[in-house]
Amino acid sequence: MNRKPGRGNRWGLAVVGLVLAILGGSALARGLGAFPQNLAPSRTTIVDANVTGFVARTSPWIWWLVALAGLILVVVGLRWLVAQWHREGRRTLCLHDTPTGVTDVSAKGMARAVADDAETGRSVLRADARLLGSRADPEVRLRMTADESAPLGDLTRHLSRVVLPNVRDALDRDHVRAVARVSLEPPSPPQRVVH
């Protein structure tokens, strides 16, 4: 699977956070008088006559530039949001890569198959799965809601004898890391049909 979008998101957020921390820290330090008086007197305002004069001289062009910069930020932000939204469905996991061909599976399709497999258990009410990791080290994360009155041994047997062996077979791996989170809730009451 491709981890580049996640790495890019982390770097982008780290850079934005660092810039905001530096700006906020320097403004706080300036307000507390941490800088020498000749460098940045703490009693002077940030928007002084020089700034207002610059804005007055460049008006109205400065506002068109500010609007353009804001529009660029909005477009970049919307593009990032759309990429995050569609990324999960496009991810694939390469199972085999040989000179005769490549076998890829959709991460979303494989996760749905794992969840469907988990839902075949008698005590499982709902299941959802995600396929993470790489070709060499895949990982399955499974969230299940199970009947609180059912024996927990049935659920663990279903996971260890049906779901996980099927995942290993599908991914053609001897070992697959798996995390299963189980929530317990009462079963929904049976629906009565009156004729």
Image (cartoon, helix red, strand yellow):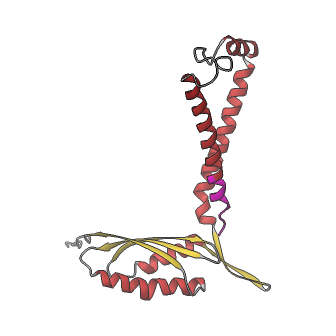
Q: Quadrant of residue 126?
A: bottom left
Residue 26 spot, x, y in % from top left: 61, 30
Q: Quadrant of residue 3?
A: bottom right
Tell me which residue sits at (24%, 71%) in the image: 191
Quarter the N terminus occupies:
bottom right
Tell me which residue sits at (23%, 71%) in the image: 189
Query: Left or right of 54: which side holds 34?
Result: left
Q: Is residue 9 magenta?
A: yes
Q: Among all residues in the image, which is located at the extreme right?
A: 99
Query: Left or right of 168: which side holds 83?
Result: right
Tell me which residue sits at (75%, 20%) in the image: 61
Residue 164 spot, x, y in % from top left: 48, 83
Q: Quadrant of residue 193?
A: bottom left
Residue 32 spot, x, y in % from top left: 54, 24
Tell me which residue sits at (75%, 12%) in the image: 57
Q: Among all residues in the image, which is located at the extreme front?
A: 36
Nearest to the observer: residue 179 or residue 167: 179
Q: Which residues are magenta?
A: 1-10
153 relative to 24, above or below: below
Magenta stretch secondary structure, dominant: helix
58 relative to 111, above or below: above
Q: Is residue 92 magenta?
A: no
